[in-house]
Amino acid sequence: MRDFRDKGRGPRFNRNAPRPPRRDSPASPAKPAPAPASARDYRRADSAEHETRRTSGNDREIVYGVEPIRELVAAAPASIRVLYVKSGDERRFAAEIDLVRTGGGRVEFADEAGLERLAGPAARHQGIAALMREYEYMPLEQILADQPDPIVLVDGVTDPRNLGALMRSAEGAGVGAIVIAKDRTAGITPAAVKSSAGAWIHLKIARCGNVARTIEQLKEAGYWTTALAPGGETSIYTLDTSRKLAIIVGSEGRGVRDIVKKGADFVVDIPMRGKVGSLNVSVAAAVALFEIARRRAAAKDSG
């Protein structure tokens, strides 16, 4: 994965967000400092291995485990505000420590008990954890000015792992930008970052308030808005992919809301061949986006 600092389109992180309580780093590895007291308030956010823990009462999140941390540091070292390393493992994580410090983060050392309080007693922190900075979204107006095609509009996907999988599918299909609704929709959290397998770093990501108004803005910018929903009157295989498209996906349970369907130019269906009536939102998005990419490539080759 690339280092976003060398690219103008990379993600940004809010360095002005409230900082966590500062501790003095231990004078030597022999005298490890405990995790900050606020770590005792962390509750379980996911049962999956190496998942995140969220502080109750605020939006600060922790990611932990060797592979998730190394992936995050390699892709976006400036996304880490504080890197917590188990005392005695300084040489083991020397590369990560250097990258985080270069990216403007700080490194603190903790004993086993301190890391357990930070990540949770059942978590396999493997000697390392990180507090991420708040992700700073790109303004929607900037994305519309750049005219990426297609755009994906996400409304109601509440599971950050589904959002991460969706970002992975979108980036793999050549999508350059995603717009995420602010209400009832997951944001760019450590769980979403992990599930995206590095795809998030390559995407321009905005948040929007009123989805109906955003659809109108997309239309004004020249996009044909396409809601992806079972029972749509247009098949994904007959959709006119020569148009500039904005693909709208809805929640895991109820799908695209009726008010959103009414505002869209098309409601597009993925024909199902078996007895199951619908697909997971990230899978449905992958099918649609790769079909659009395939047909556009075929049209370009034949032209």
Image (cartoon, helix red, strand yellow):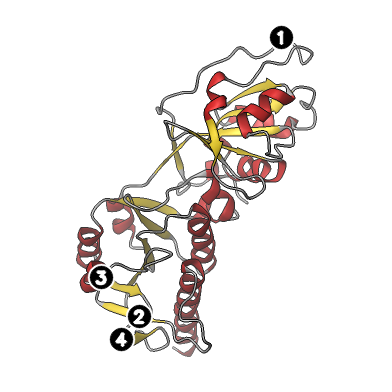
Query: Which of 173/266 is in front?
Result: 266
Q: Which residue lies furthest to the top in this view?
A: 27
Which residue carries the number 4 mark?
233
Q: In this view, does 116 lie above or below 24?
A: below
Left or right of 153 on screen, residue 13: right
Write down the quadrant of residue 42 in the picture: top right
Which residue carries the number 1 mark?
27
Residue at x-position 54% and y-position 43%: 45
Q: In this view, does 281 lie above or below 73?
A: below
**Disc 1 from disc 2: Cα separation:** 61 Å
Q: Give whichever of discs 1 and 2 has the lower sequence position.
A: 1
Residue 260 in the image: x percent, y percent? Answer: 25, 67
**Disc 2 from disc 3: Cα separation:** 13 Å
- The amino acid marked with disc number 3 is Asp
Tell me the number on the disc at residue 258. 3
Q: Neighbour class for label 3 at 10 Å: few (<14), some, many (≥20)?
A: few
- The amino acid marked with disc number 4 is Glu
**Disc 2 from disc 4: Cα separation:** 6 Å
Q: Give whichever of discs 3 and 1 has the lower sequence position.
A: 1
**Disc 3 from disc 1: Cα separation:** 60 Å
**Disc 4 from disc 1: Cα separation:** 67 Å
